[in-house]
Image (cartoon, rainbow, N blue to C red):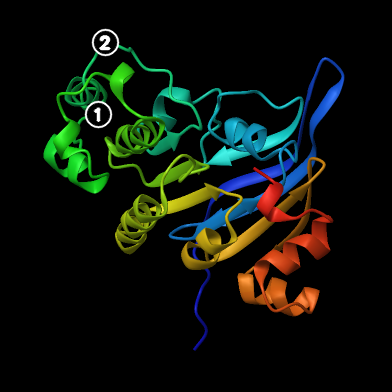
Amino acid sequence: MTNTPAPAVIEVEHVAKSYRGAVAVADVSLQVREGETVGMLGVNGAGKTTTVEMIAGLRAPDHGRTSVLGLDPRRDRAQLTQVLGMQLQEAQLHPSLTVSELIELYRSFYPHPRSQAELLELVELTAERDVRFEKLSGGRRQRLSIALALAGRPRILILDELTTGLDPAARRRMWRTIETLRAEGVTILLVSHTMEEVERLCDRLVLLEAGRVIAAAAPAELLARSGTSTLDEAFLQLTGHDPEVSE
């Protein structure tokens, strides 16, 4: 008896995007299956953020097609926001609103949101619930952005540099949060430059270089293909860049 692969819930086919003649994404195709956690790796300028912004409908591709749960991210944006949560690298939120006020605002967008208490606990911001956004540190802003992305109980979650600005202890606590979401069946696309992070969290990895996919495989397969013993070495061999200086 063979196991039937889970259906693809994110499909990207030959997307491309340029800005004023500069190519950000040359040709990217990928799939993410239901329940998977897929890591997207690459140096700055490889096209990671532009790719996920096209998947989320924040940018329109110049060429190619994207689909999320059968929805067109641009045409069906209202429907998409009910099933997809996204955490961006830099949250642009009202500076004078408190953590709890921002969470309540985002909860109001959904018919069956997570409770405020649950969201605060997931990202460990209960003690900061009455702190205004402008007073939060960079790491706490990052954690709040993740809470807001989770407010609507999304089936799919896009995380762009999840642990940027977090200290090592906070980073590991956030990894545990992601592992909880994985256990709940949430499909996750994780943009990262941290090899330890993707090795711990991801079922498959997609490596981008100069706006193109140069490898897509499980971490163990990438190691076997590159003939290396660590993902840092595999990344260096496949991209020619050291991941430690790729932030």
Q: Which amino acid does label 2 sit on?
A: Ser
- According to the picture, the residue beneath numbered tag 2 turns out to be 96
Quarter holding residue 140: top left
Judging depth in this view, the residue of 13 and 143 nearest the camera is 143
Q: Where is residue 141 in the image (x, y as percent from the top left)?
A: 36, 30
Q: Residue at x 76, y 24 (%)?
A: 62
Answer few, some or many: residues within 10 Å of disc 1's Cα (few below 14, many 20 plus, some between 14 and 19): some
Query: With respect to residue 126, does 195 lie above or below?
Result: below
Taking the spot 72% from the left edge, 43% from the top edge, the residue there is: 13
Identify which amino acid the numbered label 1 is placed on: Tyr
| Tag shown at residue 211 | none
Pick the front one: 75 or 197: 197
For the C terminus, give its image quadrant.
top right
> Is there any visible trace of residue 225 in the rendered image?
yes
Query: Which residue was labeled with disc 1?
Result: 110
Residue 176 lies in quadrant: bottom left
Mark 1 to mark 2 CA distance (whole Å) = 23 Å
SS for tag 1?
loop
The nearer-to-camera label among 1 and 2 is 2
Q: Where is residue 24 in the image (x, y as percent from the top left)?
A: 77, 30
The picture quadrant where one finds residue 178 is: bottom left
Question: Relative to residue 43, is residue 241 depicted above or below?
Answer: below
Image spot of residue 75 (x, y percent): 54, 22
Bin the neighbour count of mark 2 within 10 Å (Cα to Cα): few under 14, some 14-19, many 20 and up.
few
- On screen, residue 95 versus residue 213, left or right, reads left
